[in-house]
Image (cartoon, rainbow, N blue to C red):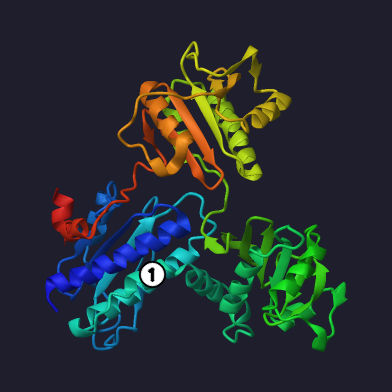
């Protein structure tokens, strides 16, 4: 196979990873370092500049040392593409990495963004492990039989990545003889998450464990063996979930049927599905794996992290107490908006005095260090327009209109709140705007830039990936 053909295979796997992980985690960049044969120089493909800033560590690992070339198995022993010797995470800050060696590709390691709101890195590592296998497979596939299907497999891999990680976790807890099919269990969880009963989405806890674990629990009610509803009978299971909505009880299943109801116990070797109406979480025992909503799995823990806001406040000339209090006020309002599923916009005005903004002003600024007043600010954030908060921790106005000149990086798909924040901050550099959308992550704006997206390049094309592939030594010398 010629070099262009191999690059095409890398492009397909890279695009599939980026597309799939962006749906699972949020916008995600992907990079690859690889050497096809033991004596080949390492090549790097990083079209979205994910590895910028990590040059010293990469130089130390790959140019100043040849340890990466060492392998306990020969290529002959790894002659089948499915025989993968894993390479674990390199520990780079803000990056998840996973790789492997095979007979087709001597060394490859994939890198993706480490988002700060992940439930667990486990499913993502399984995703990267699958990418290693698929690229190895594609490198040994003859041109006449190559279909490019790896891209589509990786793009739709979310449920299987969750399954693979749960299987690994359960194997450590109960051994290799799994008494139920994890895929069927996950499909039932997703099906239940969308099913209403008297107009309400499910709320309550469902635990799936082997019978040995279930027999050790104190049953409040145990159903006769021949009368247990099948876990795949979603309508029946949904009705039973209504009985455990208070979270003090949980419905238990052996992976095939619903066995009964027990008092809530978190620390058991089981798959725990915690339904919270319009979303929920999947855990193995105490370890949270992922969240789910709208019939899909997601990596997010559904908690706002606002790392960008923390970094901005650290750069400002504020004393530590004020910085901490401002962040706490914003975080409280954001959390409340997310919990109540309504949009919101917060203008954090660091000017002194604050700038005038068109909106409903308070006769006297409201002191937000008071808990009752902060609760009022949360309520006012539900109204159309933004709330205006000064660096003195006072609420000056609400229902504010954010106007400004058109900005070149506007995104028409994001609506008026998003684009107004871009325009307004472009005109007022000492203002930070935080927006919350009912169906998207929190965004932080300053100087006409959405800081939660500035590192992502969504329009990286296949041609750019082709151009960006070069030796690691060349890349480090730039």
Q: Is residue 147 above or below residue 79?
A: above
119 or 173, which lies in front?
Answer: 119
Q: Residue at x 62, y 30 (%)?
A: 383
Placement of 410 over or under 302, stated as above or below: above
Indicate whether 376 appears above or below 332. above
Query: Percent from the top left, x then y, of residue 469?
Result: 18, 60
Count of all numbered marks drawn on residues in the image: 1
Residues 243 and 305: in front is 243
Q: Is residue 379 left or right of residue 126?
A: right
Quadrant in the picture for residue 45: bottom left
* Residue 475 appears in the rendering: yes
Q: In the drawing, does residue 125 fall left or right of residue 371?
A: left
* SS under mark 1: helix
Quadrant for the N terminus, please: bottom left
Residue at image location 77% in from the left, 60% down from the top: 198
At label 1, counting other C-alpha atoms closer than 10 Å, the crowd grade (few under 14, some 14-19, many 20 or more) is many
Name the spot of residue 430 as percent of width and height, x first. 41, 21
Q: Is residue 58 left or right of residue 116?
A: left
Asked which quadrant contains residue 23, the reply is: bottom left
Query: x, y percentage for residue 2?
Result: 12, 75
Whether residue 97 is visible, yes or no, is: no
Residue of label 1: 154
Q: Position of residue 333 (x, y in %)?
A: 61, 34
């Amino acid at each position: 196979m010629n070099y262009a053909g191999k690059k095409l295979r890398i492009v397909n796997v890279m695009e599939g990873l980026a597309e799939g992980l962006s749906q699972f985690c949020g916008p995600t960049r992907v990079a690859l370092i690889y050497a096809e044969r033991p004596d080949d120089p390492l090549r790097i493909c990083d079209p979205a500049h994910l590895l910028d800033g990590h040059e010293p560590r990469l130089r130390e690992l790959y140019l100043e040392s040849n340890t990466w070339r060492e392998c306990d198995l020969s290529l002959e022993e790894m002659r089948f593409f499915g025989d993968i010797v894993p390479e674990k995470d390199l520990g780079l800050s803000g990056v998840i990495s996973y790789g492997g060696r095979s007979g087709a590709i001597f060394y490859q390691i994939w890198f993706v963004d480490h988002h700060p709101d992940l439930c667990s890195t486990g499913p993502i590592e399984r995703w990267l492990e699958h990418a290693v296998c698929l690229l190895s497979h594609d490198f040994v596939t003859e041109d006449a039989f190559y279909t490019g299907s790896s891209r589509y497999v990786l793009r739709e891999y979310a449920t299987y990545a969750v399954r693979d990680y749960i299987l690994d976790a359960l194997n450590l807890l109960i051994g290799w003889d799994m008494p139920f099919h994890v895929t069927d269990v996950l499909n039932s969880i997703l099906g239940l998450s969308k099913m209403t009963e008297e107009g309400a989405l499910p709320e309550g806890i469902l635990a799936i464990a082997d019978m040995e674990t279930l027999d050790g629990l104190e049953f409040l009610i145990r159903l006769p063996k021949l009368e247990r509803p099948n876990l795949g009978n979603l309508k029946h299971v949904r009705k039973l979930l209504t009985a455990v909505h208070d979270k003090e009880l949980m419905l238990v299943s052996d992976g095939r049927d619903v066995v009964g109801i027990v008092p809530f116990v978190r620390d058991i070797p089981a798959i725990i599905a915690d339904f919270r109406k319009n979303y929920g979480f999947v855990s193995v025992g105490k370890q949270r794996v992922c969240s789910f909503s709208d019939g899909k799995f997601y990596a997010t823990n559904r908690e706002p992290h606002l790392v960008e806001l923390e970094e901005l406040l650290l750069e400002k000339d504020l004393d530590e107490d004020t910085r901490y209090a401002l962040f706490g006020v914003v975080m409280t309002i954001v959390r409340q908006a997310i919990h109540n599923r309504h949009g919101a916009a917060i203008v954090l005005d660091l000017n002194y005095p604050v700038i005038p903004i068109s909106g409903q002003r308070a006769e006297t600024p409201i002191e937000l260090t008071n808990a009752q007043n902060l609760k009022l600010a949360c309520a006012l954030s539900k109204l159309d327009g933004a709330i205006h908060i000064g660096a003195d921790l006072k609420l000056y106005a609400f229902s504010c209109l954010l106007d400004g000149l058109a900005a070149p990086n506007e995104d028409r798909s994001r609506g008026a709140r998003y684009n107004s924040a871009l325009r307004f901050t472009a005109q007022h550099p000492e203002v930070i705007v935080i927006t919350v959308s009912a169906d998207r992550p929190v965004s932080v704006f300053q100087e006409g830039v959405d800081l939660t997206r500035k590192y992502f390049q969504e329009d990286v094309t296949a041609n750019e990936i082709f151009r960006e592939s070069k030796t690691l030594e060349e890349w480090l010398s730039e």
